[in-house]
Image (cartoon, rainbow, N blue to C red):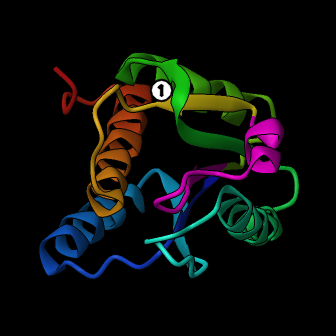
Amino acid sequence: MQNIQLICVGKCNARYFAQGIAEYQKRLAAFAQFSIVELPEETVQEKNASPAAIEKALEKEGRAILAAVHKGAAIVALCIEGKLISSEELAAFLAERAGSGAGDVAFVIGSSHGLAPAVKQAAALKFSMGRITMPHQLARLVLTEQIYRACTINAGLKYHK
């Protein structure tokens, strides 16, 4: 069974997002060993945050992210400059990983400041959920649903229309 991690910087505090994520996490159990790792967001003084302070926070978050990734897992970094992919393309990526014998995948959602360059460089795939900006908790819900959708596509189920 494929091991899929969702590594997120920050907590999911909104109950309605958490409920949706929990539902898809429960459904995913039939297809993969799916886990969510929440890492703390580094505190940056938002009002007068210097680029150096933001870079320092991102570097610290990046080290924590890379330490949380299971050994041998392919990192999928969610970032605005990433590639736009369809549900079918995500399914093909997961199937290719599973078929290669090195099936572990770690999806990463960074903090409000983004992802450290080191995480993006380590990524096997940089992927964008679109050009819109959305709260990270909503991105987590949407991504969890898309991972579930990809698994159902690969299993030949009718969830995806």
The quadrant the C terminus occupies is top left
Give the x, y percent position of residue 8.
52, 65
Q: Is residue 122 magenta?
A: yes
From this view, report whether residue 58 is shown above or below residue 31.
below
From this view, report whether residue 86 is shown above or below residue 58.
above
Q: Nearer the viewer, residue 145 or 55?
A: 55
Residue matched to label 1: 91
Q: Residue at x 34, y 26 (%)?
A: 131
Q: Is residue 58 left or right of residue 153?
A: right
Give the tally of numbered discs.
1
From this view, report whether residue 33 is shown above or below residue 102.
below
Q: Helix, strand or loop at disc 1? A: helix
Q: Nearer the viewer, residue 55 or 106?
A: 55
Which of the 4 image quadrants contains residue 53?
Answer: bottom right
Q: Is residue 27 left or right of residue 51?
A: left
Q: Residue at x 59, y 25 (%)?
A: 93
Which amino acid type corresponds to the residue marked 1 in the rendered image?
A: Ala
Give the x, y percent position of residue 124.
75, 32
Magenta segment = 106-123
Q: Nearer the viewer, residue 114 or 90?
A: 114
Q: Residue at x 42, y 62 (%)?
A: 29
